[in-house]
Image: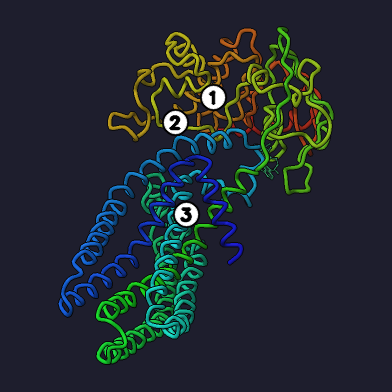
Amino acid sequence: MNVLFRKSLNSIALLFRYAPGLTILKLLQTGVSAALAPLSIYFTQRMIDTAAGIIKDGGGWNGLALWVGLLLCAMLFSSAGGGFLNGILYIAIRRRLNIGMTPDIVGKFKRLDYACFEDKDVQDTLERMSRDPQDKVFQLFLTILGVMECMIGVAGGALIYAQAGWWFVAGFAALLVPMIWLDFKAADMMNTMFNEQSADERKMRYLGGLLSHKSSLFELRIFRAGEYVAKKWRALAHTVMDTRVKTTLHAQKYFLISTILFKCWSFFIVISLIASVVSGDITIGLFTALIASTGAVLGNADMLSHTVQNLRRRYLLMEHYHKFMSLPEIRHGGESLTGEPPHIVFENVTFAYPKTDVNVLKGVSFEVRRGKRVALVGENGAGKTTVIKLLCGLYKPDGGHILINGKDIQALDAAALRRVFSVVFQDFCKYELTLRENVAFGDLSKLHDDGALQDALEMGLARGIAELDTPLGKLEENGVDVSGGQWQRIAVARACLPGSAFVILDEPTASLDPVAESSMYHSFAKVLKNRGCIMVSHRLASARMADKIVVLSGGIVSETGGHDELMSSGGLYARMYESQSAWYAKGGAGA
Ligand code: ADP
């Protein structure tokens, strides 16, 4: 309970940071609205008793007017506070959270250390933070208010009971505790089941997605594997539903006992109160108030166990929020680069991915002279993409140095690094926005510079795919669906736009056919002029046009040199090249 209380204060403090005045107002409005329910019962009690007094003894009209007035005020405030004010505060706080919290979360995403995105332990946190976290924080606050409301309702009811004697309060508490425990147990059972089923539900969603998404459905039909996937989905759905039915039946038993207790207590109250009112021990007003309070208080007690359960579930989101906000951020140095074109040196670089102990790079050394075209080749898993990620500063080397004009890249500021490299990864992004935006994301200062955008499209061999302002993809009604190869060309155009000293292509051409890839690299060689290029391709025909080829193998650079030089030395490159040439000669589709 202590932890729940501390965490409640934490989340109220978080909301207070973004909307201090509104949070106080909402707390006040909730507190007053919750207190008005027992107060209204009390005012009714006094009104009835005063009216009974007037009938019996006459006079006392002022007293009656006072209780009627107070009851009317309470009812008016209840409807205004519960409806109108509540609605206004809801929207206003939600808006403040959107304005204040969204940029903080987006900013944190931008600053996150890249390694976080690859860490499976933080994947769930990142996924939750990308799905409307402001709303979840707000829902948590509303749940806390819900608990507060129930507690005020129960306390108010206890005060009304106290008028009938403290034995009444004690009896009520003796019933309430097991009732809340039973409800809590039932709700806990249901929650645990939902939590345990979340992995199966994710799997079900995935399998369902396979059966409804265009690309997978198409492939599944061709392979006639659709029925297999559907069967798997059905089996999982059966297991999930069976468990759900069993647990619900089990939980309902607890709810049933709790309801029986409630009914017995109500029956006992009615009987004993009728006796008391007949014998004149209590007034008719108090009798009415006690009956009304019984329903209200037990309703609140029932709600309490549900809202506390909800609270426990929603706190998980807060844990994710705090975990997210404390994730490590990228640290860039503050040094800039001087005007001369960059010269890159990899010096004995070693690297293992976080949470692994396998050294992917075991002392990689090579250099890229300014304006040169370098091809990074090697077998799958040799570490080519890893080299590119280190070069872009996405990870830090464990040993050795990566130097640009003699300066360690970790000492450079982010803007300086961006002027050196722009990169297209294999899994580049397809933005379902206009073609203009797709290209301009490379350098947003050129968003309206049609000439520069067209030049970039030219370099990526993407000219003529669509008009600049045509939306791509299916999001917009007039959107144009472009092919995988066309998306790749657009991604290359995006990387060409910023005019960085080097363009890095990490096999973005994988879904182009070998002839188109070769033609793209040729056009590239022409348009790059004095800009350098680092390309990764497993098709060695493309590597041929590079000034220098760096061959990675076993975590080190096993060979470097020009195509002819490497061919005549007869090493790994020559063997790979010859096996690919033989494959081409046999008519294989793409090396
Ligand atoms: P290449 O680009 O040459 O095919 P990569 O650089 O992608 O090779 O991968 C080199 C090695 O590092 C592979 O064994 C791969 O499994 C491993 N690896 C790649 N990314 C990760 C990662 N995020 N976490 C752990 N290991 C990784």
Residue occupied by mark 1: 517
* Mark 1–mark 3 CB contact (< 8 Å): no
Badge 2 element: loop
Q: CA distance from mark 1 to mark 2?
A: 22 Å
Between discs 1 and 2, the one toward the N terminus: 2
Give the residue type at disc 3: Leu
| Rendered view: 555 above or below 316 | above
* Residue 475 position in % (x across, y down): 34, 35
Location of residue 283 by image quarter: bottom left
Residue 246 numbered tag: none
Q: Is residue 425 left or right of residue 570?
A: left
* Residue 412 position in % (x across, y down): 73, 21
Q: CA distance from mark 1 to mark 3?
A: 53 Å
Give the residue type at disc 2: Tyr
Residue occupied by mark 3: 140
Give the residue type at disc 1: Glu
- Is 126 in front, or is 242? 126
Crowding at mark 1 (Cα within 10 Å: few <14, some 14-19, many 20+): many
Q: Is residue 258 left or right of residue 343?
A: left
| Rendered view: 556 above or below 267 | above
Crowding at mark 2 (Cα within 10 Å: few <14, some 14-19, many 20+): some
Residue occupied by mark 2: 431
Badge 3 element: helix
* Residue 204 position in % (x across, y down): 44, 60
